[in-house]
Amino acid sequence: MSRTENSIKNIKYALIGQMLALVITFVSRMIFVNVLSAEYLGINGLFTNILSILSLAEMGIGTAIVYSMYKPIAENDVEKIKSLMHLFKKTYTIIGLLITVLGVMITPFLHYFIKDMPNVDYISIIFLMFVINSSISYFYSYKRFLIIANEKKYIASLYRYSIFIAMSICQIIILITTQNYILFLSVELIATFLENLLVSIKADKMYPYLKEKNILPLETNEKELIKKNVQALIYHRIGGVVVLGTDNLLISMLIGLVAVGIYSNYLLIISALMLIYGLIFESLTASVGNLGITQTEEKNKNVFYVTNFAAFWIFGFSSIALWNLVNPFIEIWLGSEYLFNMQIVAVLIINFYMTGMRSSVRVFKDAHGLYWYDRYKPLAESIINIIASVILANYWGVIGIFIGTMISTITTSFWVEPFVLYKYGFKTSSIEYFKIYFKYVFITIIAGGFTWLICSFIVGAGIVNFGIKLVICAIIPNLIFFIIYRKNNDFIHLVQVGKRELLDKVIKVLK
């Protein structure tokens, strides 16, 4: 299949799977908060954050090796792919063991991470189950990356979401019948192991050479390139974990576990959207990586502008919908006691928008392997984030932590990432990017203002009023975007791709 066909298929499977997973996740969370206390919800969020910090042991090795695979895959260089996969296996086995050891070492000190230790039985065992669940995936998951690098992420998506949905159904049954949190986590452990094992077996069938024992050592220059990229990615990993993975930890230490539980519901919604949209952009990464090997920079830049336009439409519309719908939805879903005020919601949405609008830049920067040039950016971002969050939390509470994240993004990633992509990837100035960016922001604000004004006439809570607001949010911003951009080349290109996909489906049905 062509790059476009592979990308569309990857996106299609990812979207369908994630949408189904999202529905069952919301059902599971609703049952969770009704069966177990808010402290369990806080523990769930806190321990997930701690494990994301332990995942720093991965150091970006996976990303560096995947980037090194694009060229041998494009050239069908099986021997080099085998060598890279051997390195993958060895390093990921070590990382899995390291995370296990670090998790065991942290267990006696859990009380330092929680301001008010809840009355929860077997909290150390619960944490160790999180640790094992995180570490076992490394023993098999490296083969998943070969499938993805070959532009066949839809295969990995099929396994992931099938097993996730089955796991969630089992967990719901356990919550209803036993109210046992440890049994709930045990199902997740089994599912994680099963998914990675099945993907590993599938990769062996797709690429039989993975079982071959005659592995040639990597050339010195190849090792040096991976080493250089890993050194740069270590900083990126630190930045990503500190900025995105410490909010729950800071809230737990400075505010309390109940606030972590409330935030975890907003995080579930925002993360679900980010995951769905991230799947779209990640599905493009392998194709963009192949594009970077086989096409000119001018072609790369044109594709980037189309991708960036898609990011604007997706995250502009989603931010507007979140502002009008997220609190009414949570109130219907879980109750008013799980709501943040609109000031906190506004900061969360701004962070969501800024992170989302970086998607196209990150895809192209990663696909071009431009990790080295902004390697110190994540360290600056991390330091600014922690200092700003801790200081502002003492004055403003929870909202101060989220404003700290916003400040760290604006002062670093917001401008550094596009600067690096344009200078070292496209070999041109990034001024054009920022002009387009701020125009997108302005149009999003205008569309958001109109949408909010219309929604403000719908007074009161309830499913009916929520449904009316949902329809308004679905129509108004998209209509405004369409009116403004209907003759835009990037929009026309996206429509043509969609029409081509629809035509292919019709032809298949007729056959």
Image (tube, rainbow, N blue to C red):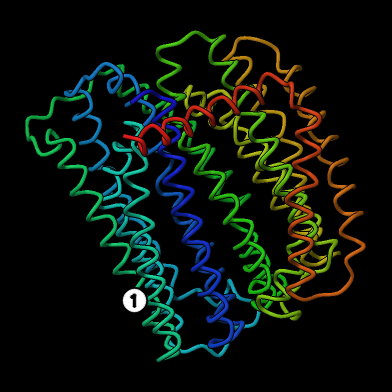
- Where is residue 216, by image quadrant? top left
Judge left or right: residue 189 versus residue 473. Answer: left
Classify residue 482 by image quadrant.
top right
* Location of residue 96 with respect to 499 vertically, above or below: below
At horizontal 55% and vertical 70% (from top left) the residue drawn is: 26
Where's residue 462, x and y in %? 77, 76
Q: Which residue is mark 1?
A: 186
Three-letter amino acid code of the residue under disc 1: Ser
Closer to us: 462 or 90? 462
Residue lying furthest left in this view? 213
Which quarter of the rendering shows the N terminus?
Answer: top left
Corner quadrant of residue 337:
bottom right
Against 205, residue 422 (above or below) is above
Query: Between 75 and 332, which is closer to the camera in this rendering?
Result: 332
Between residue 312 and residue 216, name the one nearer to us: 312
Question: What percent of the width, then of the height, locates residue 490?
Answer: 66, 22
The residue located at (12%, 33%) in the rendering is 209
> Where residue 485 appears, x then y in whole percent?
76, 27
Residue 85, image x and y in percent? 23, 35
Q: Is residue 59 left or right of residue 497?
A: left
Residue at 88% x, 40% y is 446
- Crowding around mark 1 (Cα neighbors within 10 Å: few <14, some 14 to 19, many 20+) is some
Residue 343 against residue 67 in the figure, above or below: below
Viewer-side residue, 137 vs 281: 281
